């Protein structure tokens, strides 16, 4: 799963992997 963010697609996942996991479950 790759998220496109202003900072970067991979940077966001690495920075907040836990948050991404939660958002991924909800979305």
Image (cartoon, rainbow, N blue to C red):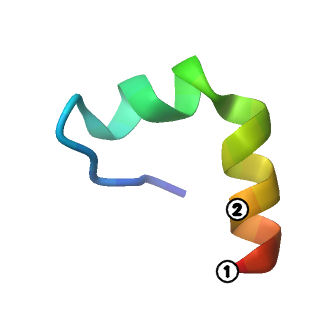
Up/down of 22 relative to 14, above or below: below
> Which residue is pictured at 28% across the width and 53% down the height?
4
Specify the quadrant that holds the C terminus: bottom right
Q: CA distance from mark 1 to mark 2?
A: 6 Å
In screen coordinates, is 7 left or right of 11?
A: left
Instruction: Bin the neighbour count of mark 2 within 10 Å (Cα to Cα): few under 14, some 14-19, many 20 and up.
Output: few
x then y, percent, for residue 2: 44, 53
Can you give x and y, in whole percent of width and height, for residue 25 in the image?
Answer: 82, 71
Q: Where is residue 21 shown, x and y percent of the image?
A: 77, 50
Question: Disc number at residue 23?
Answer: 2
Determine whether the residue tagged by mark 1 lies in a helix, strand or loop.
loop
Q: Residue at x 32, y 40 (%)?
A: 9
Around disc 1, counting alpha carbons within 10 Å, would you say few (fewer than 14), some (14 to 19), or many (20 or more)? few
Mark 1 vs 2: CB contact within 8 A: yes
Instruction: Specify the quadrant of the image occupied by residue 1.
Output: bottom right
Which label is found at residue 14? none
Q: Residue at x 78, y 77 (%)?
A: 26
Seen in the image, is 6 located left or right of residue 15?
left
Instruction: Residue 8 in the image: state x and y as whole percent.
Output: 25, 32
Residue at the disc numbered 1: 27
Residue at the bottom extreme? 27
Instruction: Using the image, determine if residue 5 lies above or below residue 1.
Output: above
Q: Determine which quarter of the picture holds residue 14.
A: top right
Q: Is residue 13 above or below residue 11?
A: below
């Amino acid at each position: 799963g790759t998220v496109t963010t202003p900072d970067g697609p991979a940077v966001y996942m690495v920075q907040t992997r836990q948050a991404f996991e939660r958002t991924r479950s909800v979305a």
